[in-house]
Image: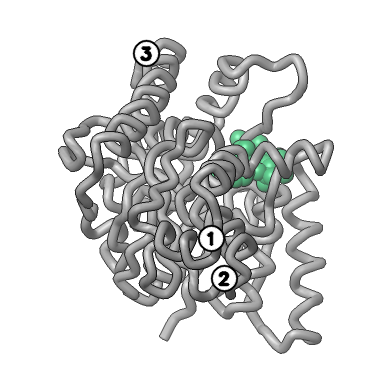
């Protein structure tokens, strides 16, 4: 059987980590693509030389030519620029929107059957734009944010309760950003609702609120510590989990940014909701019931995403 082919568009911090993980996990042969000449080739060479030590024989190549992503089964997109001091949110949106146009067209022309996972920020707007520019079916284009945000939430809950992260199932809805909605009512410690566990462990509601806030600003906390750049290990791990769910037809229920298509009373946008990921990509959006407070928090998040989509449409009238 032919090996799977994984194309990584963007060979920066997350792209390089994705390639490393994909090779270690034996997901298939890997193409690292970037507009910068030398970087994807250099990283591919470095990563190839892990093979003899780790015992993997994935073919890892670097490229500046979209033709090399032809036939990719999975494409993970991290291409773009990060916000730098002095750059407004709109400046960033304008730059990354143009990047999504180039990437979307590259995918459309070279690998239209791939399952595409977008990571580039602002996530919910960029994955929507990537779908529009690529013309791929909506079930084949998803955004990674919820897996990461719920991993951050789970980490903080496990630390607070002094339990293994393996037993924490944390739930996050909505857009990727300050308005995301960590949902305590669906978060459990091995089936025990978080609020019950908090009582058992003597953790106050105020403390749980702090954990929710820390989750919401989880990315910013790391940016501030690093000084330059943003998180990349956990973002890469999270996207790989999504790729594995697709490649293995695992039917995992993962929080992903997907085209909601009428679910949650929403339409025409991408936002983070639980979705079944299997061989057909995003196979089914799972619509859970929410309390009034959760609903209004989700609405705030959705409004923030809509504002970004309007800004994208103003920047590129073809959208
Ligand atoms: O949860 C999430 N979705 C995220 C998102 C969590 C963390 C970081 N998140 C975002 O991912 C972040 O805000 C960025 O927008 C992306 C990628 O983050 P990374 O840390 O990998 O950024 P780098 O190291 O700057 O890498 C970006 C690469 C860099 O090598 C550029 O040369 C390349 O993108 N780039 C391009 N590649 C292909 N095509 C085009 N047009 C292009 N433009 C830049």
Give me the C-alpha separation between circle 2 and circle 1: 6 Å
Q: Nearer the viewer, mark 3 or mark 2?
A: 2
Give me the C-alpha separation between circle 3 and circle 2: 45 Å
Mark 1: secondary structure: helix
Q: Quadrant of the N terminus?
A: bottom left
Give me the C-alpha separation between circle 3 and circle 1: 40 Å
Toward the viewer: 159 or 302? 159
Is any part of residue 34 visible from this angle?
Answer: no
Image coordinates of residue 188 in percent, x first then y, are: 40, 65
For label 1, the residue is 154
Image coordinates of residue 308 in percent, x first then y, are: 43, 21
Query: What residue is drawn where x is 40% and y is 31%?
Result: 129
- The answer to whether 197 is drawn above or below residue 150 in the figure is below
- The answer to whether the residue bearing label 3 lies less than 8 angstroms from the nearest atom of ligand 1 is no
Query: What residue is drawn where x is 62% and y is 69%?
Result: 162
Query: Dot 3, how many residues are within 10 Å of its Cα: few (below 14), some (14-19), or many (20+)?
Result: few
For label 3, the residue is 317
Earlier along the polypeptide chain: callout 3 or callout 1? 1
Residue found at the far bottom of this picture: 55
Give the numbered dot on residue 165. Answer: 2
Query: What residue is drawn where x is 36% and y is 72%?
Result: 191
Toward the viewer: 128 or 319? 128
């Amino acid at each position: 059987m032919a090996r799977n082919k994984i194309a990584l568009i963007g060979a920066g911090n997350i792209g390089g980590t994705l390639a490393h993980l994909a090779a270690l996990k034996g997901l298939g042969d890997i193409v690292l693509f970037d507009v910068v000449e030398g970087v994807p080739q250099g990283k591919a060479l470095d990563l190839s030389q892990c093979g003899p030590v780790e015992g993997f024989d994935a073919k890892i190549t670097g490229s500046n030519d979209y033709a090399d992503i032809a036939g990719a089964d999975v494409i993970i997109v991290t291409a773009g620029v990060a916000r730098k001091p002095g750059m407004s949110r709109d400046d960033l949106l304008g730059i990354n929107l143009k990047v999504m146009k180039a990437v979307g067209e590259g995918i459309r022309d070279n690998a239209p059957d791939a399952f595409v996972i977008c990571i580039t920020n602002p996530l919910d707007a960029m994955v929507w734009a990537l779908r529009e520019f690529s013309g791929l079916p909506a079930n084949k284009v998803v955004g990674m944010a919820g897996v990461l945000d719920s991993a951050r939430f789970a980490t903080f809950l496990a630390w607070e309760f002094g339990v293994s992260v393996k037993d924490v199932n944390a739930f996050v809805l909505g857009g990727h950003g300050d308005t995301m909605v960590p949902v305590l009512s669906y978060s459990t410690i091995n089936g025990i609702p978080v609020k019950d566990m908090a009582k058992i462990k003597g953790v106050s509601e105020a403390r749980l609120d702090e954990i929710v806030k820390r989750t919401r600003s989880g990315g910013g906390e790391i940016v501030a510590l690093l000084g330059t750049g943003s998180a990349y290990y956990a973002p890469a791990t999270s996207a790989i989990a999504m790729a594995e769910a697709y490649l293995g037809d695992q039917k995992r229920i993962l929080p992903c940014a997907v085209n909601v298509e009428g679910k949650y009373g929403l339409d025409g946008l991408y936002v983070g909701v639980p979705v079944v990921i299997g061989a057909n990509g995003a196979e089914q959006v799972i619509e859970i019931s929410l309390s009034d407070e959760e609903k209004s928090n989700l609405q705030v998040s959705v409004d923030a995403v809509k504002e970004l989509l309007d800004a994208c449409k103003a920047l590129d009238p073809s959208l």
